[in-house]
Amino acid sequence: MIVFTYRSSNADPDARWKETTVLEEFFDTQDDARSAVLEIRTEITAAALADWSPFHIERVELAPISGRQFLTLINKGVRPFVRSCEVVETID
């Protein structure tokens, strides 16, 4: 299964998928992920809450999840199922 997500370019790439308490947002398409990032950028810049830093959009390949593996997903998050992850776009 292929999904898309995003992360701040300031985030530590070595820590990716290791933190199980951080909720990820996943999308069916790169366009949907891009739209979410652009919305975040608009909110941050309009509210002047913080300086904008670029976000990476990532293409994530997940192993199939079935049967009792669903419990692993609930308890440990998506990390055990990530086969590959690559940055496909950066939103400045």
Image: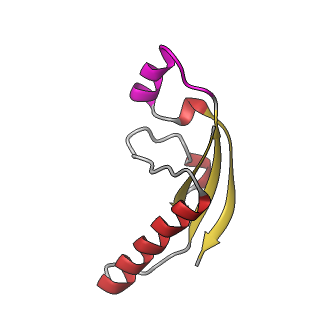
The percent position of residue 91, horizontal first and vertical second, equals: 58, 74
Q: Colour scheme used in the picture?
A: secondary structure
50 and 65: which one is in front? 65
**Residue pictured at 55% horizontal, 73% vertical:** 54
The percent position of residue 69, horizontal first and vertical second, equals: 50, 19
Q: Is 23 above or below relative to 68? A: below
Q: Is 21 above or below relative to 29? A: above
| Residue 8 in view, yes or no | no
**Residue pictured at 45% horizontal, 48% vertical:** 24
Q: Is residue 77 left or right of residue 12?
A: left
Q: Is 33 above or below relative to 63? A: below
Main secondary-structure element of the magenta-colored stretch: helix
Span of residues in magenta: 64-76
| Residue 84 in view, yes or no | yes
The percent position of residue 76, horizontal first and vertical second, equals: 45, 29
36 and 80: which one is in front? 36
**Residue pictured at 47% horizontal, 14% vertical:** 68
The percent position of residue 33, horizontal first and vertical second, equals: 53, 61
Q: Is residue 86 left or right of residue 91?
A: right
Residue 67 located within the stretch drawn in magenta: yes
27 and 24: which one is in front? 27
